[in-house]
């Protein structure tokens, strides 16, 4: 609901992206459990894209905050937490693959 109050035009896009990404990870984890050969590299690639996207978005949000183009640090904090979580998940997947 917070994202709707910040930008009602992008709320649907953000909600669909979050649901779509979560569903993708759910399906990929099921395929990994079934030992589908291509599932692990595809999952690792998707998480890499998510991690890089979150890093880029967090950087732009924090840049806008510190250059006083925005007074909202809440969104920047949430995207930073998503970046850290994605990076930790990528690290955990890398360790489990070895």
Image (cartoon, rainbow, N blue to C red):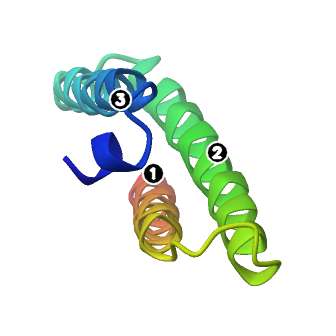
Regarding mark 2 in the picture, which secondary structure is present there?
helix
Q: Residues within 10 Å of mark 2 (few under 14, many from 20)?
A: some
Earlier in the chain: of badge 3 and badge 2, it is 3
Q: Position of residue 86 (x, y in %)?
A: 46, 58
Earlier in the chain: of badge 1 and badge 3, it is 3
Identify the residue position indicated by label 3 in the image. 21
Q: CA distance from mark 3 to mark 2?
A: 12 Å
**Identity of the residue drawn at 42% across and 55% down:** 93
**Identity of the residue drawn at 64% across and 45% down:** 53
Identify the residue position indicated by label 2 in the image. 53
**Which image quadrant is residue 74 in?**
bottom left
Frontmost residue, 47 versus 58: 58
**Identity of the residue drawn at 41% across and 49% down:** 6
The mark lying in front, picked from 1 and 3, is 3
Identify the residue position indicated by label 1 in the image. 97
Q: Position of residue 2 (x, y in %)?
A: 26, 53
Frontmost residue, 15 versus 97: 15
* Disc marking residue 81: none
Question: Seen in the image, is 2 located left or right of residue 13?
Answer: left
**Which image quadrant is residue 34 in?**
top left
Relative height, residue 75 to residue 9 (above, below): below
Q: Residue furthest bottom?
A: 66
**Which image quadrant is residue 62 in?**
bottom right
């Amino acid at each position: 609901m917070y994202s709707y109050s910040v930008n009602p035009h992008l709320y649907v896009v953000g909600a669909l992206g979050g649901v779509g990404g979560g569903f993708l990870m759910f399906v990929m984890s099921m395929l990994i459990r079934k030992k589908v050969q291509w599932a692990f590299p595809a999952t690792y690639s998707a998480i890499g894209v998510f991690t890089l996207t979150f890093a880029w978005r967090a950087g732009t949000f924090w840049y806008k905050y510190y250059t006083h183009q925005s007074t909202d640090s809440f969104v920047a904090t949430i995207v930073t937490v998503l970046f850290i979580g994605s990076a930790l998940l990528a690290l955990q997947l890398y360790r489990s693959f070895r």
